[in-house]
Amino acid sequence: MGGKYKTPMLDELEKGPWPSFVTEIKKAAKRTQMADDELGQVEKSYVTKRGYWKHGGIVGVLGYGGGVIGRYSSLPDEFPGIAHFHTVRLNQPSGFFYTAEALRMIMDIWDKYGSGLTNMHGSTGDLVLLGTTTENLEPLFAEYSSRGWDLGGSGSAMRTPSCCVGQARCEWACIDTMNICNEVTQYYQDQLHRPSFPYKFKIKVAGCACDCVAAIARADLSIIGTWKDNIRIDQAEVKKYADAGMNIQAEIIDMCPTDCMSYDGKTMKINDVQCNRCMHCIAKMTKALKQGKVKGATLLVGSKAPIVVGSLLSWVVVPFIELKAPFDNLKDLADKMIEWWDDNAKPRERIGELIEVKGMRPFLEAIEMPPVPQQVREPRKDPFFFWSESDFN
Amino acid sequence: MGGKYKTPMLDELEKGPWPSFVTEIKKAAKRTQMADDELGQVEKSYVTKRGYWKHGGIVGVLGYGGGVIGRYSSLPDEFPGIAHFHTVRLNQPSGFFYTAEALRMIMDIWDKYGSGLTNMHGSTGDLVLLGTTTENLEPLFAEYSSRGWDLGGSGSAMRTPSCCVGQARCEWACIDTMNICNEVTQYYQDQLHRPSFPYKFKIKVAGCACDCVAAIARADLSIIGTWKDNIRIDQAEVKKYADAGMNIQAEIIDMCPTDCMSYDGKTMKINDVQCNRCMHCIAKMTKALKQGKVKGATLLVGSKAPIVVGSLLSWVVVPFIELKAPFDNLKDLADKMIEWWDDNAKPRERIGELIEVKGMRPFLEAIEMPPVPQQVREPRKDPFFFWSESDFN
Amino acid sequence: MSLPERQTDIGPPHYEKFLPPIVKKNYGKWAYHEVLTPGTMVHVAEGGDKLYTVRVGSPRILSTDTIREICDLAEKYCDGYLRFTTRNNVEFLLSDQKKVDPLLAELKAKKYSVGGIGPRISNIVHTQGWVHCHSACTDASGLVKAIMDELHDYFTTKALPNKVRLAVACCVNMCGAVHCSDIAVVAIHRKVPVIDDVNVGKMCEIPTTVASCPTSAIRPNPKTKSITINEEKCMYCGNCFTVCPPIEIHNPEQDGVAIVVGGKVGSLRTNPKFSKLAIPYIPNEPPRWPSTVAAIKNILDVYAANAKKHERVGEWIERVGWEDFFKLTGIPFTFQHIDDFTFMRDTMRNSAAFKY
Amino acid sequence: MSLPERQTDIGPPHYEKFLPPIVKKNYGKWAYHEVLTPGTMVHVAEGGDKLYTVRVGSPRILSTDTIREICDLAEKYCDGYLRFTTRNNVEFLLSDQKKVDPLLAELKAKKYSVGGIGPRISNIVHTQGWVHCHSACTDASGLVKAIMDELHDYFTTKALPNKVRLAVACCVNMCGAVHCSDIAVVAIHRKVPVIDDVNVGKMCEIPTTVASCPTSAIRPNPKTKSITINEEKCMYCGNCFTVCPPIEIHNPEQDGVAIVVGGKVGSLRTNPKFSKLAIPYIPNEPPRWPSTVAAIKNILDVYAANAKKHERVGEWIERVGWEDFFKLTGIPFTFQHIDDFTFMRDTMRNSAAFKY
Ligand code: SRM
Ligand code: SRM
Ligand code: SRM
Ligand code: SRM
Ligand code: SF4
Ligand code: SF4
Ligand code: SF4
Ligand code: SF4
Ligand code: SF4
Ligand code: SF4
Ligand code: SF4
Ligand code: SF4
């Protein structure tokens, strides 16, 4: 098989040092008609500068409302192998850890039913299997699920939660990101597989303010690890950084956003009351500075992409919460958030958009959080604000 | 006359070191029934915590549509002296300069026709004569206008322009604020006296970025002096400030927003390309630092109070314009702005609000200004933007 | 008595008529100035001429009597020349240094407040209040008097880190510059307007009234030929009352004032800033508004104790963070502080870094 | 062949199954790490255990063949353990230092790109493009390949002031993290959609279609039983096309990409930031998008030459000002740069201080 199409345009993209997706498609095309027709259609897109995919139809596996993105070529006669070309979202394990054995099993089954192409991983976090037909969906699902692998989310549902590597390989993880991610994924299995929300709901967990999973920018509920007490300083290690040539004044002291550090060439001092725990000094001097010991997370809500009134970054709603397995307090809060959203949102309205429409107050009241200054960057500017009956007591 | 009312509440406000408006009203109340009834009604407001004024009716002088704010007591039987209590806005001279002679003349006429009370000055800048009757308006106007004084603006019209003291008594005035203010006031006499705009239009002129007339916050057209070339440094004077105990590093260098200054204890240096001409260093070391010599103004548009969608500060539209008497280039630009606004605004829509609705582009095109980075603090965030046919050529 | 012949569209008299000779001579040629005392300064011209300014506080509401008294003083010490400032103070302009002290002496004797120059408070920009405006939900002049009495030392003597601009507006129309002041008071309503259906029907244009509401809380009510207000949506701005008086928004027991802080208009060091909400509500307490006065004093004191030299109130707050502002002032943080209007997106905290 | 018994709602396998023993042992007990080379780092546990990571670039679209090859490597050097990163790179996890160099040697021989750790670029977060998405107005994978080829040295060797996060989204749905990236590409339309009235009538719910438009540009057209679009108001977001396919928005000659810059997600030093528009339009130039690649290279080079150590792209720009960004990069400033959408109020300059 393979080689049905001349692909002079795509061939250009096999040149150069970065690994080539074209090479990958060609590899698969040697074995599957699907991949070969995919290659042909993409080449055509490169010539005409447009895609040839129809809107997705609803396809899936029995009892599930999501996990598969239906996709059909708009040129099925020209490219019959991709007349159906659905993607299957396999829910990745927390932290994207695998063994060769597990991965080989996944690949073997995929070669049996699909194009031989994958996305490792999708932007949300799923292990994306790229291209199969409607009739292959059921057997494929049976094979995977019987071996302990389930589908991820799609549609107006809980979406596959995702997290940074956290405590598995990072000294700064204030929370057990992988366990939290796994726990919420398991807790929301029903909502993940059976779309019943107003729109998508995403959860992402980062172990510290570095936010290596971009939680604050692309999760309806962003969970970010932090601490409350003082940064621990190892002065001997500070000295080693200085000796190794670090310009501590310029690189650390002057870049501290709260101006709460000082270094006189010998001793580093931090006025911890002023520190906003931004992680800069710790990240750049990991041997010398350690976070405090009272650890937990900040919960932020609402981020999303720009459609339709501009992107949102998540907003702080719970400045600090301790998170210990099995994370019941977190699940309880997430339930309340989702319930309020579900009760109030229009279709295709994300939770951040709903808060913007309704205001923070009803949301905070629904999740039983008091107003605190940490929730705002600055207070309101205009003199127009609501009063509730309860304010008059 | 006077003393008709017991005013225990207001009497409390005659105590304390700051000059008392109550004392002022009482002074006038000795001579006019109006002021005495005003005293009585205000005392009543202090007891009941509410005002007793009706909405203004339209009153004025022949041929003018503005300059008088009609005001009627809602308790005319109780306070007959203020059954009518209109204010008259006399257009102040640029910079609020007076001679005793001129002021006495104004007061004498006011005592003849009004309450004997004034506001020196109103927030827009007018010399406000506080309280007279409808029938007194014509004679009062005849007296003033025959002596060279005219009314200011009110209603949906050009409003009385105003300015800082500028070159009359300030070393930092990059433009002749008083002359500009006077010139635009004269130029727009018709629009000032005969409301024909969608809403009010205010012009304020400040000689430099200190903005001593708060132009940027409360003028539809804010004119603010600036310069283009290098700050002139007198190192000997710098030394004197240091000798006098100024902590130049902390007070000047560290507070420079663009980090473009340095001082080694001997010589002060400014990297003028980076300077944003904020005026801080010059204001705090006026003997040592002088603005450059290429002077002109920045034109900003749109500021207003919060009704109804939040306050606006004026936006930079023309970063730099030379302004030399008779300021034809300025008048021409102002005309274009007003014309575009007049053509497009709904009633009670300020120019800033209209720009927000229509976008900057049509406005800039109307005044024939190209887009430049100086107009924005930062470029747009979302990927949604318009293309005109002209962009495709 | 026949009236003099009226003129129209002549505009104000040309300012040159009122300029002291020393100003005319040195117009545009000033070299520098020095603040001599909190109420006096000298401007020195390139050629060496010196102009002395003495600044005097004013209640802004002035009787003709007082203005005549000021004119007398101007004639005695300044050849009759004087001016008012953009914050409504009076400035005596002296070309003769020898007359400065005698003027100050006479001002002191007559109990004028001399001050307001340099890093301190100046007069409070304010508005009409119960003295003249139908829209007022507090009195501006009374508030100003009570505040200035309390802060008087900061006008006449005491220095602050930088100028502190105060303002009072008697309704949300904000005829003062409240929206960009260091510390300011704005009067607010807190209750949904009460509708007088009969008069609304008679006196108001229903479509205009409906359109006046920024939150679309108003609907026409064909039955009553009047309107109805959705209580959930109304945030008491009073705009409907402005266009339709029988929609009564005043509620003496519930009206009151809010305090906003951190605004500025100059571009020095940092960008001009809007004021932000510090205290959402304090009841009206005429005649001397003690709670409001105390609240302002508290904010000013905390600023004075914590800001760096030259930092304006807003600059200090932005450096330490609003978390610290609320902590240091002890002001409670409420739902009202959280923006749910135009600027919500830009005022919510979208960062994992903040202070406790 | 009978299928195995399907299970439902079991969720993903527990991650513990896939953790290398050294990770299990030291879970939550890491003390610090050191970046050894642009593609290798070591994490040291409190007890002294050392875990070596070797990071390898991936095109994200991987064939099962390549994945099997990666599995072979993992078995040979890491007891079969490996992971993927949040930016789609592959990480080999080694507990035995001695195996690091042999692994690197084999990776080199097999032409893998090793790098992406520390202050440099990493893999480009991207999306489906013409490979799989109906909404795409560019190809993501091709753009990524072309950009990464050009910037390859910044992945494998060269250091930058800090990490530079790149992203590509093939339409404004922005399935990548374009809206908060240091430098990113987002594909856009520039022409009002063309309406296929017959099919709109047949296939679409008119009210939903009307409601889908963020700028209210769509009106029902009862005559055609379809809709009309107000050309003045349409800003080509494609949301109508998403809910109603016969509204064709694709226009191969006019579609293209915009470049946005200055975003970030971490809270280090400064708040997370949205990306802002740098270049409003570059035409699609498959197969290698030379203009887009050159534009990104230019921005990256100017950043590298001008930013302070540890400054992210957005932090550098905010320090020097956008005036300087446009001056230094030579990018023309256009009407499109000026916000006329949600954030206009906060992005216009309301200050008299700026640079030329
Ligand atoms: C596959 C994936 C892109 C990728 O190449 O990785 C993807 C692909 C699609 N996204 Fe997405 N989104 C993917 C992650 C994202 C992300 C990133 C994330 O989840 O972290 C975002 C931005 C964050 C967010 O949720 O706002 C994202 C924001 C959108 C949006 C805009 C949603 C919004 O509220 O603004 C849409 C539009 C929609 O839902 O109609 C969308 C719609 C789509 C659709 C379903 C387009 C459609 O209308 O049919 C795409 C199907 C492509 C295809 O043919 O396979 N996709 N989408 C990602 C999911 C893979 C996975 O499960 O791991
Ligand atoms: C007299 C004065 C306050 C004062 O005590 O100094 C004043 C008084 C009134 N203002 Fe004002 N405004 C005065 C300066 C301002 C300013 C400040 C300025 O001009 O620099 C502002 C804020 C800047 C601005 O224009 O936005 C201001 C913003 C308003 C507004 C809100 C306009 C808006 O677009 O948001 C209104 C409401 C309206 O126009 O209906 C308003 C309406 C009014 C009315 C006419 C109320 C009404 O609806 O009848 C007040 C009449 C009071 C009275 O009974 O005498 N006044 N008004 C000021 C004019 C005196 C003068 O001519 O010198
Ligand atoms: C007289 C007056 C102009 C006028 O035409 O009437 C004036 C006069 C001067 N101003 Fe002003 N300013 C005057 C209102 C303002 C205003 C407007 C306002 O308050 O509504 C501002 C903007 C305030 C703001 O940003 O919110 C203003 C912000 C300044 C600044 C900037 C202060 C800062 O660092 O933020 C300076 C420079 C300084 O003080 O170092 C300044 C400096 C000056 C100088 C030193 C200029 C000079 O060389 O002559 C003058 C004496 C200063 C003083 O009073 O301390 N003037 N000044 C105004 C006096 C009002 C009053 O009675 O107190
Ligand atoms: C492996 C990974 C987490 C994972 O679960 O997969 C990871 C791992 C580490 N990150 Fe990260 N980050 C990873 C994605 C991210 C992201 C998310 C993204 O790019 O979408 C961010 C946010 C970027 C942003 O702000 O826009 C991120 C911002 C950081 C930062 C903050 C950099 C800064 O100063 O702004 C640090 C601290 C540092 O570099 O000093 C950091 C530091 C680290 C450390 C040193 C943490 C540690 O002690 O182990 C890890 C190795 C750093 C490196 O690659 O240079 N990591 N890191 C991700 C690798 C992606 C890749 O293949 O390149
Ligand atoms: S987010 Fe923090 S804890 Fe998680 S991997 Fe990044 S640096 Fe480590
Ligand atoms: S964590 Fe951030 S704020 Fe705190 S001391 Fe370090 S650099 Fe400063
Ligand atoms: S705005 Fe500038 S020029 Fe005008 S008085 Fe103030 S400091 Fe002087
Ligand atoms: S004017 Fe402002 S930006 Fe320029 S050097 Fe002085 S302090 Fe710095
Ligand atoms: S602020 Fe309101 S109440 Fe006060 S004068 Fe202006 S319109 Fe009247
Ligand atoms: S007070 Fe304001 S918000 Fe309330 S109904 Fe009237 S116009 Fe609407
Ligand atoms: S960004 Fe747009 S075109 Fe690309 S995958 Fe997402 S929805 Fe499809
Ligand atoms: S492309 Fe967007 S803006 Fe244009 S009509 Fe469709 S939905 Fe409206």
Image (cartoon, coloured by chain):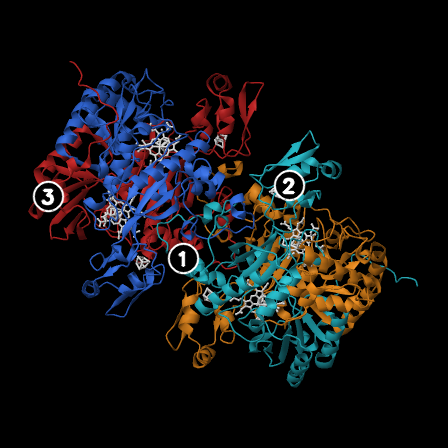
Chain colours: A blue, B orange, C cyan, D red
Disc tally is 3
Percent of width and height locating residue D155: 23, 46
The residue positioned farthest toward the front in the image shown? A393
Q: Is residue C15 above or below residue B152?
A: below
Chain containing mark 3: D
Chain containing mark 2: C
Disc 3 Cβ-to-ligand 4 distance below 8 Å: no
Q: Which residue is mark 3?
A: D105
Q: What distance separates the C-alpha of mark 1 from that of mark 2?
A: 43 Å
Percent of width and height locating residue A246: 23, 63
Answer few, some or many: residues within 10 Å of disc 1's Cα (few below 14, many 20 plus, some between 14 and 19): some
Asked if residue D47 can be seen in this view, the reply is: yes
Circle 2: residue type? Ser
The residue at 65%/81% (across/down) is C104
Circle 3: residue type? Ala
Chain containing mark 1: D
| Same chain assignment for discs 3 and 1 | yes
Q: Is residue B302 above or below residue C64?
A: above
Q: Secondary structure at mark 1?
A: helix
Q: Which of disc 1 and disc 3 is earlier in sequence?
A: 3
Q: Secondary structure at mark 3?
A: helix
Of residues B243 and A239, the one nearer the viewer is A239
Q: Which residue is mark 1?
A: D320
**In front: mark 2 or mark 3?**
2
